């Protein structure tokens, strides 16, 4: 069902300010930057072994990431779990009593199909199910 931790999402005020820490200090390779207008974020993916770090910068004050930073400050936002057949995984979660934020997949960064579990159903952790195009995990 769950194949691996695909990525860890980290909320930041500014990619420009945060990226040098990850690329120069931690020596992680920047894989790319893109805007996900539907989620009002600009994201940067950094390679970290078989997983990735996803830095999330809000594009507006209405962005869910802006709200998160306002309430909790910068830091870990979510853990993305790589899955195949995301629609089936969503159905399994719901059958097991997990409240889903997304009852059907939506498109996220790099064209991946994503769906979030509500943290109240996951012991306070925001988990994202993530399926890359073609059924492979996001990458």
Image (cartoon, rainbow, N blue to C red):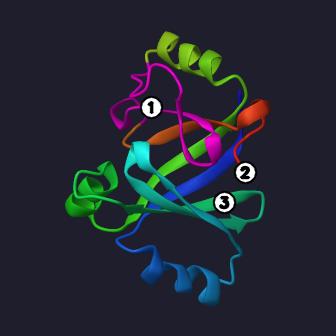
> The residue tagged with tag 3: helix, strand or loop?
strand
Mark 2 or mark 1: which comes first in sequence?
1
Foreground residue among 33 and 101? 33
- Name the residue at 34% across, 60% down: 59
Foreground residue among 118 and 41? 41
Report x, y in % for residue 28.
Answer: 68, 77
Report x, y in % for residue 127.
Answer: 49, 40
> The residue tagged with tag 2: helix, strand or loop?
loop
Query: Which range of residues does the magenta coloring cover?
Result: 98-122
Report x, y in % for residue 54.
Answer: 56, 60
Residue beneath label 1, please?
117
- Name the residue at 28% across, 55% down: 68
- Name the residue at 69% across, 45% down: 138
Residue beneath label 2, please?
139
From the viewer's perspective, tell me whether residue 69 is left or right of residue 50. left
Q: Is residue 125 visible?
A: no
Residue 52: mark in rendering: 3
Residue 39: mark in rendering: none
Q: CA distance from mark 3 to mark 2?
A: 8 Å
Kindly indicate the quadrant of the structure image that contains residue 29.
bottom right
């Amino acid at each position: 069902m769950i194949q691996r931790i695909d990525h860890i999402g980290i909320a930041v005020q500014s990619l420009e300010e945060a990226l040098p820490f990850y690329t120069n200090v931690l020596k992680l390779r920047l894989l790319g930057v893109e805007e996900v207008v539907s989620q009002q974020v600009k994201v940067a993916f950094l390679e970290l072994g078989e997983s990735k770090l996803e830095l999330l910068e809000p594009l507006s004050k209405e962005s869910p990431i802006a709200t998160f930073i306002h309430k909790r400050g910068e830091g870990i936002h979510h853990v993305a779990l790589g899955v195949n057949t995301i629609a089936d995984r969503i159905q399994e979660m719901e059958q097991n009593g997990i409240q889903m934020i997304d009852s059907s997949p939506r498109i996220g960064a790099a064209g991946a199909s994503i769906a979030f579990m509500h943290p109240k159903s996951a012991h306070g952790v925001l988990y994202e199910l993530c399926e890359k195009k073609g059924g492979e995990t996001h990458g």
